């Protein structure tokens, strides 16, 4: 019993970060278990049932247009071709198809779940969750745009950028949004 009390006393200063990590991994694994892992599909499956909302294709079209707009802001990128939800440069070495898995809905789900189930004033969650989702969407547009630019002429870079570097940045942003929630909203509210 004494060891348990020591462990609890040792972990007490870390309870917020431990709770954040528990929520993050819980929502991540919930998504992995319930949503079909084949993000290369045009359909979204929840527990084996197609639950693809009608607006997903429209969201993919909007995201494709936003990415093309972002890329065209950069120098030497005016030749980017946009065909429906497909983006590519004329050299044709790599083509990026924007599908539902590109929308960032998983990261927004995880972020929203973490904030919703974390401590803090509920009414502030009603504005903070949408604000965080907007920030994640802006990052997603930049992320996909940079992947397209960095893989131009070098398609072998795609996996390390898409599944590596930029994914870690995604979760770093989720973490930073949580840090702001904890330090800028929850703690000040607890002091009043």
Image (cartoon, grey):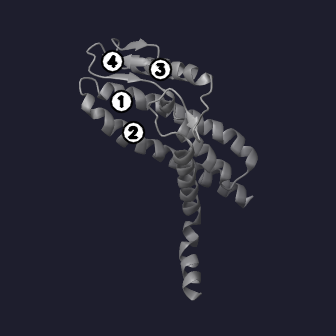
Neighbourhood count class around disc 4 (C-alpha, 10 Å): few under 14, some 14–19, many 20 upward: few
Viewer-side label of 4, 3: 3
User: What residue sits 75% from the left and 45% below the top?
Assistant: 123
Residue under label 3, please give it: 64
Mark 4 vs mark 3, CA separation in Å: 19 Å
Mark found first going from the N terminus, 3 or 1: 3
Q: Is residue 113 above or below residue 131?
A: below
Q: Which residue is mark 1?
A: 147
Q: Secondary structure at mark 2?
A: helix
Classify 63 as above or below 32.
above
C-alpha span from label 2 to label 1: 8 Å
- Dot 4 or dot 1, earlier in sequence: 4
Q: Are marks 4 and 1 in contact (CB under 8 Å)?
A: no
> Which quadrant: the C terminus?
bottom right
How far is disc 3 from disc 2 in space, using C-alphas? 18 Å
For the residues bearing labels 2 and 1, Cβ distance under 8 angstroms: yes
Q: Residue at x 39, y 20 (%)?
A: 71
């Amino acid at each position: 019993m004494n060891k348990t009390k020591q462990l609890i006393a040792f972990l007490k200063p870390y309870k917020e970060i431990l709770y954040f990590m528990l929520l993050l991994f819980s929502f991540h694994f919930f998504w992995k278990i319930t949503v079909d892992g084949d993000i290369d599909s045009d359909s979204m499956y929840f527990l084996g049932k197609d639950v693809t909302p009608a607006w997903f294709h429209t969201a993919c079209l909007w995201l494709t247009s936003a990415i093309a707009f972002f890329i065209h802001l950069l120098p030497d990128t005016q030749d980017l071709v946009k065909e429906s939800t497909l983006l590519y440069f004329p050299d044709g070495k790599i083509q990026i198809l924007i599908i539902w898995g590109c929308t960032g809905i998983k990261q927004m789900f995880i972020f929203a779940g973490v904030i919703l189930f974390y401590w803090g004033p509920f009414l502030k969650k009603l504005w903070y969750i949408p604000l965080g989702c907007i920030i994640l969407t802006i990052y997603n547009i930049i992320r996909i745009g940079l992947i397209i630019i960095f893989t131009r002429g070098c398609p072998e870079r795609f996996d390390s950028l898409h599944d590596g570097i930029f994914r870690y940045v995604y979760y770093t942003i989720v973490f930073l949004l949580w840090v702001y929630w904890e330090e800028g909203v929850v703690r000040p509210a607890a002091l009043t």
